[in-house]
Each structure stands twice: as structure tokens, then as C-alpha cells.
Amino acid sequence: MKNVIVTCAVTGSLHTPSMSPHLPITPSEIAAESVAAAEAGASIIHLHARNPEDGRPTPSPDVFFEFLPRIKQQTDAILNMSTGGAPGMSMGERLAAAERASPEMASLNMGSLNVGLYPAVKRIKTFEYEWEKQYLEGSRGNIFANTFEMIGEILERLGKGHGTRFEFECYELGHLYNLAHVMDEGLYDGPVFIQFVLGVLGGTAAELDNLLLMVRTAQRLFGNDVEFSVLAAGRNQMPMATHNALLGGNVRVGLEDNLFISRGELATSNAQQVEKIVRILTELGYGIATPNEARARLELKGASQVAF
């Protein structure tokens, strides 16, 4: 059995501050949460940025650079930057921070889809900031656009331009075929690291049959040695992660994907979720991959080659 690569997505762009007081907002909070998650066993830290004044998702390279160097100085974890950003961001905004930082790894969404955040409005009694309700309600009419042209641009500018490898985020079966297509076109020739994204409204539900189909399809398209991971939204986070490890895959946890640690109990930190999945995997007999082991398996350029 290969050791399991644990990714932690510490803040994301879909949850809003009113959903949990523990969601990291400021650069200092994001840095501290990232370091603690790495110390708990995460070898990859997936990063978004937020406006420190009100928690709104921001593409600002300046904000990213307030926490990227601090995390790197305190841990050897792989820092994985989002190119998805948040709904409404342009391609230039989505790539600005990553192109300045030249990271070892970045996320890349492999197709367009609806992302429905609006059901959360009914569960929030009081909004801390004015922007939150409009942001969530706006998802009724927004499409998270990731066209073939956009995918190709990211692969060209960040992949070929900076030697960055990718976490290919696949929300549905068709996204796996999109990835196979761009590889057939010669747009990417590195090791494939797939992140199955399950349980988002607008994508594939977080059900075991769906996970099995995604895994078997990925293995058929990319070979049995393909590196695959899973993130599942909300209460399905830990069950789906455990199932995926049993299938030979890797896992992702973090407050970007799920705000809870158990039924009805908010997670107080990202590290708490990392500690829980590491405990589950260890008790099942699995080892936890170190950052350098993950770098070797994913053929990353190394932390010394980034620009922060």
C-alpha cells in the first residue's frame, strides 16, 4: 500500500464568514491554520485568499504574498494555489497570484458547471457582512466557467511557463474525459493527480457508487498507477475520504470543503480535521505520506524553485 497523501484546503471561496467563526480570513489566520494542518499530517496545503477586512474571496497577489512566504518558512508542505478563484473572477484575476508565485502545484478545474451555494441562505440567521447573502444568492444565475480554451491557457501559462504541476479537479465523469482530451492534445505530459469533487450542488453527488465509477474510469483512462484523491462536501467528507483510501487513493479535508468535525459540531480548526483523518487512516493500517514523498510521486519541481 502506498502512503496516503493528505491535502488540506484551509479556507476556499464558497463558505462565508457567517457560517463559522473558525473559518480563517486574515493572512495571519490562513498562515497559522496552514502550518498547524501541515504539522498534523497534511503534505499539501490548498490555498485561496480572502479580503482581511470582510472575508470576501480575493484574487489579489498582494494578499497571497502576505501568507505564502510565512507558510513556507515554517513548514515543508507543498503549497497548492487555486486557479479557480471564486465565482465572478476573470481569467486574469484567477491566474495573477499563481503567475507571480510560480508554485509547485496549482488546482485546475476540468470543466464548467453550476455551483449552487444559495441553499445556505436559509440556514444563516444573521449575516456578519453585507456581501454574503448576495454572493450566495447570486449562485442561482452564475456558471463556474472552465472552457477548453481557459483550461489550455492555464496549462500553457502556468504549466509550461512555470513548471507547475496540477491538482485536476473533476466534479463529474465528463471532466475525466476532458482531462484525457487535453493530454491527447499534448497540452500536459506530467504525472496526473486527480481530485474527485463530490457533493457540490451542480456536480456529482457524494455516493459510493459514483466514487467507484470515477476511480475505475480514471484508471482506465490514465492507468492503474494514477494518483487520485477525493474531497466531499459537508458531512460526506470523512466517509468518502476513508472509502477512497481503501480504494488505493489519497484524501483531502479542510474547512473549504466542510465546516464540521462531527454531526452538529463545528470544527475549530483545519488541523482538527487533518488529525481525524490521519487517526482513521493510521488505525486502518495506512501510512501518511510526507511532503517530500508526495513531491517525488507527483514529480514536483521543489520548494526551492518557487518565487516566494
Image (cartoon, grey):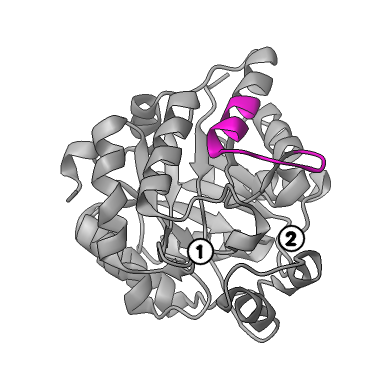
Residue at the image point whose x is 41% and y is 66% from the top: 51
Is 7 one of the magenta-colored residues? no
Residue 282, percent from left and from top = 62, 16
Q: Quadrant of the N terminus?
A: top right
Residue 213: in sight, yes or no? no
Q: What residue occupies the far bottom of the structure in this picture?
A: 141
In the rendered view, would you say 243 is above or below 62?
above
- Give the residue type at disc 1: Asn
Which portion, as a residue range, is magenta?
Answer: 262-277
- Tell me which label, 1 or 2, sits earlier in the chain: 1
Residue at the image point whose x is 34% and y is 75% from the top: 93
Residue at the image point whose x is 31% and y is 40% from the top: 71
User: Mark 2 highlights which residue?
Assistant: 204
**Residue 155 vs residue 178: left or right?**
left
* Near-viewer residue (245 or 235): 235
* Near-viewer residue (281 or 97): 97
Q: Quadrant of residue 293?
A: top left
Q: Quadrant of residue 153?
A: bottom left
Marks 1 and 2 in Cβ contact (< 8 Å): no
Residue 116, percent from left and from top = 70, 72
In the rendered view, would you say 108 is above or below 165?
below
**Circle 1 — which element?**
strand
User: Mark 1 highlights which residue?
Assistant: 109
Residue at the image point whose x is 50% and y is 70% from the top: 86
* Near-viewer residue (110 or 305): 305
